[in-house]
Image: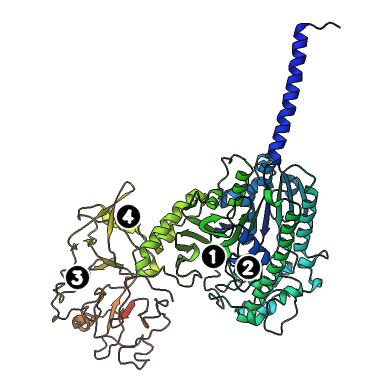
Amino acid sequence: MYYPLKQILFMVSIAFSIASCQESKTAQQAKDIHKPNIVFLYTDDQTFASIHALGNEEIYTPNLDRMAKAGTSFTHAYNMGGWHGAICVASRSMIISGSFLWNAKEKERLWSAKDSMALQETWPKLMEKEGYDTYMTGKWHVQAPADVIFSETKHIRPGMPPDRRGELSAVFKKWETESGDMTYWNDYLPMEYARPRDENDTEWLPTDSLQGGFWEGGTHWSEVVRNDALDFIDRSKTKENPFFMYLAFNAPHDPRQAPQRFLDMYPVDSIKVPDSFLPEYPFKDAIGNQATLRDEALAPYPRTEYAIKKHRQEYYALISHLDEQIGSILDALEDAGKMDNTYIFFASDHGLSVGHHGLLGKQSLFDHSVRVPLIVMGPDVPANQQLPQDVYLQDIMATSLELAGAEKPVYLQFNSFMDVVSGDNTKGHYKNVYGAYMNLQRMIRQEDYKLIVYPKIDKVLLFDMKTDPNELTDLATLPKHKEKVNNLFKELMELQKTMNDSLDLSPTYTKVVGDFKECYLENVGSSVCYHRSRIVHNKAQGIPYPISTWVSSYRRKDKALELSFPTLSCHSEARGIPTQQYTSFLLSSEGQNVEVVIPHPVLSFRGTRNPYPAVRKFPPIVGRTKRWSCHSPPCPVIPRHEESPSQSVRGFPPIVGRTKRWSCHSEARGIPFPISTWVSSYRRKDKTLALSFRGTRNPYPISTWVSSYRRKDKTLALSFRGTRNPYPAVREFPPIVVRTKRWSCHSEARGIPNTAPVNT
């Protein structure tokens, strides 16, 4: 048969193309065969301090120790936090998406809507594109359907084993209706919760298979994950493709159930109570760790040492049981000849309190809850190496993609840590570590310091993690750490932008650290001033509030106060004693801050007089308007032999007029005159004053006093009807201040702090 030349050439080209495609496919298959296998062992609720080889001498974890000795461990691996009480949802969403916390929340929304692009950008799908067989078994708790994004799945589990949590909502409501008193809280909780009350509380036992939980189905859930893994490894012997195994244990999440032989490893009497043990965390309600949070309802209130020991016993037992299952998986990989070409990662989704700081759950930003164990072993991974660089556990996803030969997608926010493991990168990829829980907590760690912010109550905590790893001593209220708090808080707010965190922390920053609201000062040489270190413009603190009042007041030129001091204290006459000295100013111009140095005090009043006429050595000490009172610190040039109004209060500015031991002022009238003028000045029929001093006459009847000398001290004892100490947190100055609606007093012998009250 005769074929035209063109047809012959076309047929030849087709043959070459087919041969070329077959050769290319064969080459790709050969390339894929040599890609390493990836095994991810993922636990739930396992804190960083729960492995024997990594420092916990109480616990028995021979197989995790085996991994640590054969590979590299990161001592500072973190989870960023969560957007609701189930922290595992956020943690697992981040590692599946490769996105930082708040972006992962958006990914969750897209997964729920079955967005095909979002599903294709998940970890298993990216591994599948690199030629991997992907396999998953165990806990999921992610909105992206596991059976859609993995090639094969088995026993997809929910967030936790079943228990009586379904009864809690009705129980909480009943308690609130009938009692509301924490004294009776424990009596309302169902079995498994608020336990154990004491040594005789044995109603619920972790070994009782009739309680369901991990025993549901007849085989402990950790053993089911092991069995599924062993089956897949056995089948992989006959397959050529590399595999990615996602093995997710529900353990050691509660209910903490393990066989008796594991409980027997840990006699209750031998369990240590954490150094940070508390009967109750004082800020628990403000940070979303209230008694009605499921995790926190597990143990009775107040926490007892016995209850914490029992919970830790069951926690350790479940981890040791889990460790045994991991050992079987490691053995199976060795027996299958896979170890030489397999990277194994071990981590947990987050930590757990289990008695630290009076907490039981993981919804805090203390290290016990945000730090996790992270171990990697495999070809060329240094053995028995512990690295201090900060990493996130979700970096495992990016690391596995690098090992698989994939190019890092632009949307992937976490980083591979293989360069840190190899020693090529000694600094790590993160300058700061970020943490968040809902809109109730924020955290930043930088080098040795950690700052935690509780915005609901405008509270900050500062810890030196090098000298205080258990986070026992809050440094935030110490003056010498003010600059550290300020700097870390600013760094945190910058970090929020990177994290796409929409929570506005500036109100808390302004109240706690201060710095930055504008105040106009007329005729002083500059138009805008800032207090650099701290302005507390809060009614309870006695500082001008809001600062916008300054701008409008001084712009109107309403014969108000004109002042400028290198060091200055001011207070609103309507609000009482100041709590802070002003120490420096910044000039603000179009958003740019420039330091302003004013060499000499300038204080002038239009139409007012100096209310301290007898005090000539402090020119002029105090002035006031209808709204403001200000004073300068004691003048340093006063001769030692001369007595000044502030002589008995060394280091504290002369705030108000005084007797030998007490100073008071009427909040309605401003700062009082020196004591020599008190009696005559207040003989006017001004019904705002009612006070009694030892050794002086009472200018007005004592009708409004409950008693004058209730305490038998040799100084003045003031008692007010229906009032309280406005500085209750400053226990080292008892009594600092007593006040009514119109009066504030303080002991000059004791002084009044020139910084915010220190929490004790």
Q: Which residue is mark 1?
A: 367
Which residue bears the numbered disc 2?
293
Report the mark closest to the observer, 3 or 1: 1
Say what amino acid the circle numbered 2 marks: Leu
Q: Earlier in the sequence, mark 2 or mark 4?
A: 2
Task: Work out whether residue 98 or residue 750 is closer to the camera in this orientation and state it.
Answer: 98
Q: Kindly report which numbered mark, 3 or 2, lies closer to the viewer in this rendering.
A: 2
Residue 124 or residue 341, whichever sits in front: 341
Residue 414, horizontal then vertical, whole percent: 56, 48
How many angstroms separate mark 4 from mark 3 (CA)? 25 Å
- Residue identifier under label 3: 621
Instruction: Return the x and y of residue 397 as percentages of the image width and height.
Output: 62, 49
- 4 relative to 445, above or below: above
Quick one: quadrant of the C terminus? bottom left
Q: Residues within 10 Å of mark 1 (few under 14, many from 20)?
A: many
Q: Which mark is residue 518?
A: 4
Query: What's the residue type where badge 1 is placed?
Result: Asp
Residue 361 visible in the picture: no
